[in-house]
Image: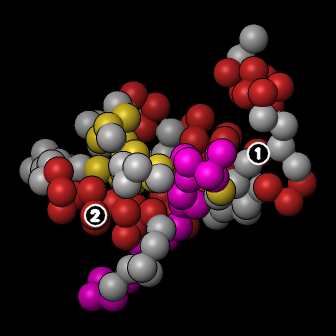
C-alpha cells in the first residue's frame, strides 16, 4: 500500500482541505522544485494542522527583492531556520540551504536541507 493510501485511511481529507498552488510560480520564485510527496500532500490536504500540534506550511512565492516576507509562512519560517541553524548552501548553488515546510507547537521548524537538484532526495531536518 502506498504511503498516501495509508494516510488517507488514517486521516481522511475533506473537500475544503485542499489548497490550489501555482507550482510553476512557486518553483520559479524559490529557484527549485519541491518534493513530489509534499506536492501530493498539499493537493490533498492543503495548509493546516494535525491534532493542533503539527502544522504544514502552504507553499508560497518568495517576496520580491528588498520586500520583507509576511510575518508567517514558508519564507518567514525558512528565514527563522536559517538564522538559528546557520546552515549554508554550497557556493553557486543558488539555494538558501533550507526550506521550511512545517512547524510544531514545540517551536520546532521542519525543513528540507537543500543538498542538490533532486528535491525528492533532500533530507528532512528539524
Q: Quadrant of the N terminus?
A: top right
Quarter holding residue 77: bottom left
Residue 22 in the image, given as x and y percentages of width and height: 64, 64
Residue 35 in the image, given as x and y percentages of width and height: 50, 39
Indicate left or right for 42 with 1 as reference. Answer: left
Residue for badge 1: 44
Please report the residue visible at 56 percent of the width from the left and 48 percent of the height from the top. Answer: 53
Callout 2: 10 Å neighbours few (<14), some, many (20+)? some
Judged by its main secondary structure, the magenta piece is loop
Please report the residue visible at 79 percent of the width from the left and 55 percent of the height from the top. Answer: 17
Residue for badge 2: 80
Please report the residue visible at 66 percent of the width from the left and 45 percent of the height from the top. Answer: 51
Indicate left or right for 6 with 35 as reference. Answer: right
Residue 19 in the image, given as x and y percentages of width and height: 73, 60
Is residue 65 shown in magenta?
yes
Q: Secondary structure at mark 1?
A: helix
Q: Secondary structure at mark 2?
A: helix
| Separation of residues labelled 2 and 1 (CA atoms) | 27 Å
Residue 14 in the image, given as x and y percentages of width and height: 88, 49
Per the rendered image, the range of residues in magenta is 49-67
Q: From the viewer's perspective, is residue 83 above or below residue 105?
A: below
Callout 1: 10 Å neighbours few (<14), some, many (20+)? many
Amino acid at each position: 500500500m502506498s504511503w498516501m493510501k495509508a494516510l488517507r485511511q488514517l486521516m481522511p481529507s475533506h473537500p475544503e482541505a485542499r489548497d490550489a498552488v501555482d507550482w510553476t510560480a512557486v518553483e520559479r520564485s524559490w529557484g527549485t522544485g519541491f518534493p513530489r510527496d509534499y506536492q501530493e500532500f498539499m493537493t490533498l490536504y492543503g495548509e493546516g494542522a494535525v491534532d493542533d500540534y503539527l502544522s504544514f506550511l502552504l507553499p508560497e512565492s518568495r517576496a520580491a527583492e528588498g520586500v520583507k516576507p509576511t510575518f508567517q509562512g514558508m519564507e518567514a519560517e525558512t528565514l527563522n531556520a536559517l538564522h538559528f541553524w546557520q546552515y549554508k548552501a554550497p557556493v553557486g548553488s543558488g539555494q538558501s540551504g533550507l526550506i521550511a515546510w512545517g512547524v510544531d507547537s514545540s517551536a520546532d521548524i521542519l525543513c528540507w536541507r537543500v543538498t542538490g537538484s533532486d528535491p525528492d532526495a533532500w533530507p528532512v531536518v528539524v
